């Protein structure tokens, strides 16, 4: 039986790499598509609403399909679902003005949110606060203010997680800030403004993972297309995010290939996209025991 609602968090607690599927432009958010994805090889599903449509009705149907097609072979009600947000993390005001997106997505029952263009610690602090209920007080009074998420969404989210409403209220808090939390909040550090604040941003409590976003970062450095191999300034930016994640205890997300898997896993990369073949090879290399 699963120990947690969120399979990705359960794996990260074991220091096991997590493998996800999904793109920046998610489509086909239907009940049938969710049912088909319930037994996915991936540990979590990325729903790309940064450039794809903010299809709340479709996502709600998709989540119901995941539940009805489950449970997973690992005993979780569904694979974890992380939504790549359409808003940018450019300022606290932008975050608070768009907090309705966070409330509605969380009420649908998703397990995580990924904030693109996370430019400042102040914006990220507002992100975390907008995802928290006011009665959750871990970290409040030091680096965080009281949570801003309101009551009502728990009634629709709890059945997706397979828990009671009271249990959902206890569990719907960011991990690892709250060790019992099941929400996974992530950041993309992907422009020159964000890179300048990397270390401070990743020290904000409540962030589970981060990545460096080479496509957007390349454009921010003035490249029309992300060059390969990456020029020195991009390599330096990548390493800065990687080192800041390591220092802050935040999981680092980066793609790779079967050939580079041992180096990446040994180097501390803990979240990877890719394919069933990459995931299979990586799980064998890390000695994973949790069923897929």
Image (spheres, grey):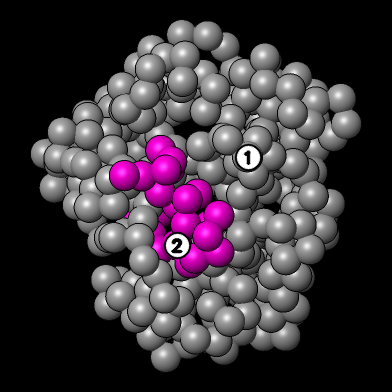
Query: Which quadrant of the figure contains the C terminus?
Result: bottom left
Image location of residue 232, percent across then percent down: 72, 85
Q: Is residue 28 visible?
A: no
Q: In the image, is 163 to the left or to the right of 127?
A: left
**Mark 1 vs mark 2: which is more N-terminal?**
2
User: Is 11 inside the magenta-drawn segment?
Assistant: yes
Q: Residue furthest right?
A: 142
Q: Is residue 16 left or right of residue 60?
A: right
Mark nearer the viewer, 1 or 2: 1
Which dot marks residue 275?
none
Residue found 79% across the figure and 50% down from its top: 203
Bounds of the magenta span? Answer: 1-30
Q: Give residue 41's position: percent from left, percent from top.
A: 26, 61
Occupied quadrant, residue 5 = top left
The residue under label 2 is 18
Q: Nearer the viewer, residue 62 or 180?
A: 180
Q: Quadrant of residue 58?
A: top left
Where does the N terminus fall, quadrant-wise? top left
Q: Is the stretch drawn in magenta largely helix, strand or loop?
A: loop
Q: Which residue is at the front of the view, 177 or 52?
A: 177
Q: Which disc, if any, is residue 179?
A: 1
Is 259 colored magenta in this rendering?
no
Residue 136 visible somewhere in the drawing: yes
How far from the left and from the top, in percent, is residue 146?
75, 19
What residue appears at the point 35 percent right and 30 percent down from the top-left corner? 161
**Mark 1 falls on what kind of element?**
loop
């Amino acid at each position: 039986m699963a120990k947690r609602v969120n399979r990705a968090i359960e794996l990260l607690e074991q220091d096991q790499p997590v493998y996800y599927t999904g793109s920046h432009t998610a489509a086909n958010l239907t009940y049938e598509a969710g049912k088909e994805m319930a037994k996915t090889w991936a540990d979590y599903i990325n729903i790309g609403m940064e450039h794809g449509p903010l299809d709340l009705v479709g996502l709600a149907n998709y989540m119901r399909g995941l539940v009805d097609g489950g449970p997973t072979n690992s005993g979780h009600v569904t694979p974890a679902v992380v939504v790549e947000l359409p808003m940018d993390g450019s300022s606290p005001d932008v975050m608070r003005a768009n907090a309705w997106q966070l409330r509605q997505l969380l009420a649908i029952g998703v397990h995580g949110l990924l904030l693109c263009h996370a430019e400042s610690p102040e914006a990220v602090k507002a992100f975390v606060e907008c995802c928290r209920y006011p009665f959750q007080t871990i970290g409040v009074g030091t680096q965080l203010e009281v949570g801003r998420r309101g009551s009502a969404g728990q009634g629709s989210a709890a059945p997706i997680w397979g828990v009671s409403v009271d249990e959902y209220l206890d569990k719907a808090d960011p991990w690892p800030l709250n060790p019992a939390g099941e929400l996974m909040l992530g950041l993309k550090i992907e422009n020159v403004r964000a890179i300048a604040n990397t270390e401070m941003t990743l020290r904000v409590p409540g962030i589970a993972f981060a990545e460096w976003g080479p496509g957007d970062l390349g454009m921010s450095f003035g490249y029309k297309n992300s060059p390969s191999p990456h020029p020195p300034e991009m390599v330096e930016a990548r390493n800065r995010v990687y080192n800041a994640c390591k220092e802050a205890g935040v999981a680092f997300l980066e793609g790779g290939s079967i050939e580079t898997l041992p180096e990446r896993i040994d180097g501390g990369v803990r979240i990877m996209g890719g394919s069933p073949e990459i995931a299979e090879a990586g799980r064998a290399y890390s000695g994973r025991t949790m069923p897929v």
